[in-house]
Image (cartoon, rainbow, N blue to C red):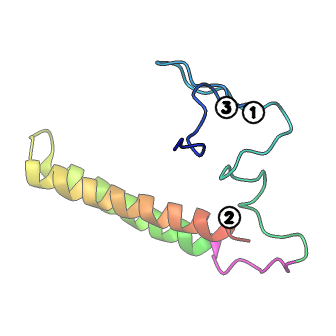
Amino acid sequence: MTDDHRPIPGPRPGHVPPIPGRQPSAPPPGVPTPGAPKPGAHLAAPESPVRASTIEPESVTQRVDELLAEVDEVRQSVGDTFDLAALSRQAELLDQAHDVLTGALDEVDRR
């Protein structure tokens, strides 16, 4: 008895085997790539209402100015000496100022 249900050896029609060590080519222009982000997908839908920002620029500026003033106070308190604790405190304050600014930008970007 012969087994007529075995696959025929050789390449399948329409199938091109990959070349070892070579990346598969990109699809031709205009052909969507599965899983690729769509242009503008991160933007709000045109029909959605644009909400007003709850960020007050003056409060952001004031908070950043306060933090930078503290950085200057720490720097002036140690003078020309190298103080690792003071440097660490300055880094913390600058990080807080960065967080205030990026938080404000994130809020504005969500509009």
Residue at the extreme front: 1
User: Image check: 9 left or right of 32?
Assistant: left
- Image: magenta residue range: 48-57
Q: Circle 1 sits in a helix, a strand or a loop, which is it?
A: loop
Q: Residue at x 69, y 30 (%)?
A: 26
Q: Is residue 4 above or below residue 15?
A: below
User: Image check: 48 left or right of 18?
Assistant: right
- Residue 69 in view: no
Q: Main secondary structure of the magenta part?
A: loop
Q: Distance from label 2 to label 3 (Cα)?
A: 51 Å
Q: Which amino acid does label 1 sit on?
A: Pro
User: Image check: 53 left or right of 61?
Assistant: right
Near-viewer residue (40 or 11): 11
Report if the CB atoms under discs 2 and 3 are less than 8 Å apart: no
Q: Circle 3 sits in a helix, a strand or a loop, which is it?
A: loop
Q: Earlier in the sequence, mark 2 or mark 3?
A: 3
Label of residue 109 in the image: 2
Q: Residue at x 75, y 60 (%)?
A: 41
Q: What residue type is labelled 2?
A: Asp
Residue labelled with disc 1: 27
Q: Distance from label 3 to label 1 (Cα)?
A: 21 Å
